[in-house]
Amino acid sequence: MRIFLLSLFMLLVAGGTAYAEQPVERFFPYAHENYTLDNGFKSILIPIKGSGLIAYYTVVRTGSRDEWEPGRSGFAHFFEHMMFRGTEKYSSEEYNRLVSEIGADANAYTSDDITCYHMVIPNTKLETAMDLESDRFQNLSYEEGPFRTEAGAVYGEYRKNFASPFSQAYEKMLDTAFDKHTYKHTTMGFEKDIKEMPNMYEYSKSFFQRYYRPENCVLMIVGDFDPAKLKPMIKSYYGGWEPGYVPPQITPEPPQAKERSVDVAYQGRTLPLLWIAYKGDAFDPADKMVASAYLLGDLAFGENSEIYKKLVIREQKVEWIAGDFGFNRDPKLYDVYTRVKDENDLDYVIAEIDKIAETFKTELVSQEELENIKKRTRYGYLMRLDTPDRVASGLSRIVALTGGIEAIDELYGTIASLTPEDIRAAAQRYLKTERRTVLTLKGEKS
Amino acid sequence: MRTVVVAVIMSIVLLGIGFASASAKERVVFLPADDPTVSFRILFNVGSQNDPPGKEGLAALTATLITEGSTQKHSYEEILELLYPMAASIYDQVDKEMTVFIGRTHTDNLDAYYALFKEILLEPAFSEDDFKRVKNDYLNYLQTTLRYSQDEVLGKETLYEFVFAGTPYEHNEEGRVASLNSITLDDVKKFYQDHYTRANLVIGLGGGLDKDFAAKMTKDFESLPAGEPSNVPAPQPEDIHGLHVKIVEKEVQSTAISFGFPIDVTRGSRVFYALAMATSWLGEHRNSFSHLYNVIREARGLNYGDYAYIEHFPRGHRRQFPPPNVARRQQIFQVWIRPVPNETRVFAFRAALREMQKLIENGMTEDDFELTRKFLKGYILHYAPTTMMKLGYAMDDRFYGIEKGHWDTFAKMLDELTRDEVNAALKKHLSFENIKVVFVTTDAAGLKDTLINNEPSPITYQSEKPAEVLEEDKEIEAYPLSVKPENVTVVKVEKMFEG
C-alpha cells in the first residue's frame, strides 16, 4: 500500500524529471553501499562523481543524551573538543598541521543524540584523512594540563552563547520539561558542571573507553571516490579497533501528567519569547504518528500556516512563529516558538495557539494542503543535496538515530502515505495541554 | 585542484544568448551547470552607501520590503503560499555597495518559481501594512537583538562605524533608530525608482537551464528604467594615528573585542593575495589553522576562537565561509577576539596585538609560509562549492575587474608569490600601532584606566601551563599600550545606533 501511494505521489510531484526514473520506493537519489567490519564498525559509502571533493564524516551515536551520570552534563560536547588533542602517533600540533596541509575544512559538533566529526578534503588526500581519523578514534591520548585548558575553552563557548535569550530559554525549557531523562540538560551542560570539568580528567578517559567504540561509530564517506578501492583501506585502518561499547543507563522520562510552566527573567532587553513544547515520541521512520507530527509542526505553525498569516502578517502581534516537531532517539519535545512584540499580548498568543491546536484536533486538513507540504518536504530535502558535504551533513542525524541511512527512504515513504486523518490523529495525540511546558522569557529592561 | 577552479571560470560563458542589446549582454553572468536546481542572483550596484543622510537603513529596508512584502498581483500571504510547495524562497542581502536578491529552485518548478521571482522584483506593491511590519522588525533588531543579545556582532558593527566614521560606509546597513523612524513609504518607493535600474543591474543565473531562458529573463528585466549608475565617491576614511578605543558599556560576564583599520587593497591585485596568505596564517576564520586561535584559545583557553580578516565578512558568527556579493572599493582589516572573561580582556587584546607586531616586524617564517601555501591550495576549494556560490563570485569578479576569476587567480598566486613579497606586503599595509579597537564590556572606567596608564594585566589559570607559555605571559602582561585619554570613548549600549 505504501509503495502504491508513494508511486502516485512521485508521479504527482516529479513530473518526468530524472528523479521519476528512480525506482519508486527510492527517495534518496544516490546509490550507497554499507560495509561493516568484524568489529562492528560500519561504513556508508556514497560515491558522487565530479566535484573532486570528499566529505568524511564520523558519526558517534552519543550526544548529551548519553550523559546519564550526575554532574557530568556537557561532557559529550567537551569530549568532542578533546578529540583534537592528539595521540601517541600524532600530537595535537602534528594533527593540526597535517589537516592544514591537506587543505581540509574540518570541524565537529555535538548535540543531544550525536557527536559528529566532519571534514571535506580534496579526493587525492583521502588516505591521509583516514590515517588521521582512524588513529584518533582508537588511540586518543592527552595529559591533564591540556585537558584543563580545553575545559576553559568550553566555558568560553558557554559564555559566548549565554548572552543570547534563546540559550537561556532553551536551558530552562529542558530543565522544566524533564525530570528523569538526560534530555533535562542542554548539550552545553549545566553551568555548575562545566565549571567542574577541569577536575574530571580520569572520568574523561572512561567516557572515551565506553563510547568511542566501533559498534557505536559510523563512518560516512560521500563524494568523488571509488568504493572498491576504499574498502581494503577501511579494513586496514579500522579493522584493529577493539569493540567494547557500554550503553548509557538512561532513565526513561515518566509520562507528563499536567501542564508545566516557567518564566525566565532575561537580564537585558529583548522582546518576550513564548515557547510551548509538547512531549513527543522517539523517532521511528515507519511510524505514521511520528511522521504526521513532523508535518503537523509546519502545517499548524509554519510560515504558510493560518496562525502565521494572522499573527505575523495581518495582526503583526508577533515577529515570527515556527513549529519544529523534530526527530530524537528518545521521546523529546515538539516545539512551537514565537517572539511576541508586546508583553501584554502573551495570553492572547497562547490562546491563538490553543485555538489552532483545537482546529487540527477536530478538523481535517485539505488534501491539497497535505500534498503541498509533502511536496515541500521532498523538494526541501532534495535541494539540500548540492555538495558531498551537504549530502553527508543531511544524513548524519539519521545515521545517529538509526545507525544507517535506509531510514530516509522509509521515512519519506511513510510521509507519502499519510492522510488527513493521520494528521488529525497526531494533533489529538500530541497537542494536549497536559503534555506541554509553557515558557515565557521577558527582558528585565524591556 | 587548480583545474577545478579553471574549469569553473571557463564555463562562465555567454553561449550565444539572443540579447536585446550589447548593454544587456554586459549585465548577465550565466553559469550553466549539470545541476537539478537553478540559482538566481539579481544584483543592483546600490547599497547602504546610497542611503540619503537622515534616512540610514533605507537601502536595506527597501530590499526587505521587496522580499517580505506583497506584489501588485499577490499579497505577501499568497506569495508564501505559492512558494511553499516548492520549498523555495527569495531573500535579500544588502551591503555597502551591493544589493542582491537570491533565490533557488528545483528545475521541476522553474517556470512557476521564476514567474513569482520576477513579479516580486519587478512589481512590488510597497503596501503600508508590509512597510509597518518590516520597519518594526528592523527597529526591534537594533533596539533589542543587536544591543542586548549579540555582543560579538555589536562589537563588530561598532568597529565598522568607528573605522569608517565620516564616510558613506559609516552606518550599519540596518540604519539607526531615528533614521528608520523618519523613513516613509514614499522614501522607499523613490529609492526603488531611482536605484533599481538597468544601469545598476547585473543578472546572475546558473544551474540546470538553457540559454533561451537566460535570454528571456534578460528581456524581462529590460522593463526596469534605464537610470544612471549610482555614483557615490569611494570612501576616504581618516588616517588613524595611535590606538583609538571605543568601549560599549553594558553588563556582561565576557568581553567581546574587535579591532582593525581601513585598507585599500582589494581582491584581484597581487598584493591582495599576499595579504590574504598572511591573514590566513594569522587568523583563518573559524579554523584551528589560525595562529591567534592557537595563542589565545589553544594554549591558554581564554575563549572560543580568534580570527583575522582582509575583507569584510558579514555574519561570521554564523558562517564558515563568507558570502559573495559584499564587494567593496574600500576594505577593512580586522581581528575578531571572541568573548573572553572580563578579567582577561586586556591580556587577550595585548596577546593579539603582540602577535600582529611579531608578524609585521619579523614576517612569516619559511615554514609557516610553505604550510600556508599548502593549506590554502586545498582550502580555497571550499569557498565556492555550489553553483550558487560560484555564480556570486563570478559576479564579484565583474565588480573587481578580475578577468581570470578570483579563485583561479588565488590558486595561481599561491604558486607564484614568494615569502619576501608577502612579508613586504604585510609590512607595508598592516599595522599594530595605528588601529581602532572596540570592547563590549562592563566597568568601562576600569578598562579605560588600565589602558591609558598602561597597567600590566597579569593572568592566572585554573590549570598548569607549560613553562614557555608562562614565560611568554610575562611579556604579554606588560606589552606596552600607548593610549591617550582623549582617544578613549565610552558609549552606553542603549545609545548605540540611536541617532
Image: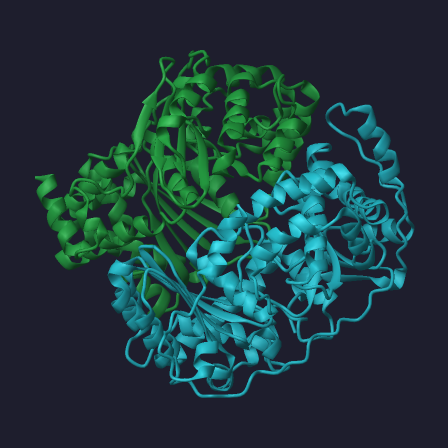
Q: Is residue A343 left or right of residue A300?
A: right
Q: Position of residue B216 (x, y in %)?
A: 32, 76
Q: Position of residue A265 (x, y in %)?
A: 53, 48
Closer to the camera, A388 or B349?
A: A388
User: What coloring was used for the rendering?
Assistant: by chain
Q: Residue at x 71, y 53 (%)?
A: B274
Q: Position of residue A184 (x, y in %)?
A: 44, 32
Specify the quadrant of the image occupied by residue B240.
bottom right
Q: Residue at x 46, y 84 (%)?
A: B189
Closer to the camera, B53 or B20?
A: B20
Residue A75 appears in the rendering: no
Q: Residue at x 22, y 51 (%)?
A: A18
Q: Is residue A232 left or right of residue B195?
A: left
Q: Colour of chain B?
A: cyan
Q: How many marks?
A: 0
Specify the quadrant of the image occupied by residue A1.
top left
Closer to the camera, B323 or A332?
A: B323
Q: Residue at x 62, y 28 (%)?
A: A95
Residue B49 appears in the rendering: yes
Q: Is residue B359 left or right of residue A321?
A: right
Q: Position of residue A315 (x, y in %)?
A: 35, 69
The quarter of the rendered structure image containing the C terminus of chain B is bottom right
- In the figure, A14 relative to B465: above or below? below
Give the chain letter for green. A
